[in-house]
Image: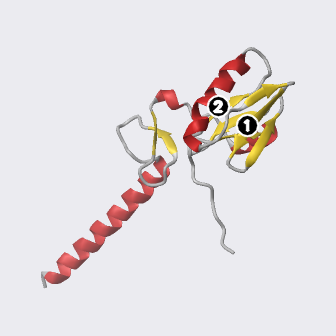
Amino acid sequence: MGMFRKKPVVIEAHQFLNDESSYALLCWINEGQPKVGKGFAKWHNNTLTIPTLEGDHKANIGDWIIRGVAGEHYPCKPTIFEATYEAANVGLGVQPCIFCGSPFVSLDGSTACSECDSSYKLAIMELERTERATAKRADW
């Protein structure tokens, strides 16, 4: 079996607090449910029941509700959420790297994160060095 890394994607998530904010959360979930062919989520007795691609899932107070890449919604326990996600600061000019997709803030108009941009520049320098060496040999 091979090893795999989860692709870096920016997700939208809201925490279920079982307070007045839960009405907005329920609307947010239900606006997307028809797009993924699922029924509406329900809020009853301090629990959210969310129809997911794998069946109905229950969200308890404190759980995070995540909108997945296909528009689906599912609950995530706070400890798992904290270990897996960090704030993305999307409103501050964050964009995905054209090479790896990682979100980054471009301050100089670049289109790649610093790690990919460095690798790309090194590859270009190596290519230019090889082309110069080839050109010199052709001049003999």
The reply to whether residue 77 is visible in this rendering is no
- As shown in the figure, which amino acid type bears the numbered disc 1? Ile
Give the x, y percent position of residue 140. Answer: 13, 85
Give neighbour class at mark 1: few <14, some 14-19, many 20+ (Cα, 10 Å).
many
Given residues 87 and 62, the one toward you in this image is 62
Residue at label 2?
29
Q: Residue at x 46, y 54 (%)?
A: 116
Give neighbour class at mark 2: few <14, some 14-19, many 20+ (Cα, 10 Å).
many
Given residues 44 and 88, the one toward you in this image is 44
Quadrant in which residue 64 is drawn = top right
Q: Residue at x 55, y 40 (%)?
A: 35
Single out the residue that lies furthest toward the bottom.
Answer: 140
Work out how far the residue at label 1 is from the one at label 2, CA to CA, in angstroms.
8 Å
State left or right for residue 50 relative to residue 96.
Answer: right
The answer to whether the residue labelled 1 contacts the one labelled 2, judged by CB atoms less than 8 Å apart, is: yes
Please identify the quadrant where the N terminus is shown: bottom right
Residue at label 1?
50
Give the x, y percent position of residue 123. Answer: 38, 64
- As shown in the figure, which amino acid type bears the numbered disc 2? Ile
State left or right for residue 23 relative to residue 105.
Answer: right
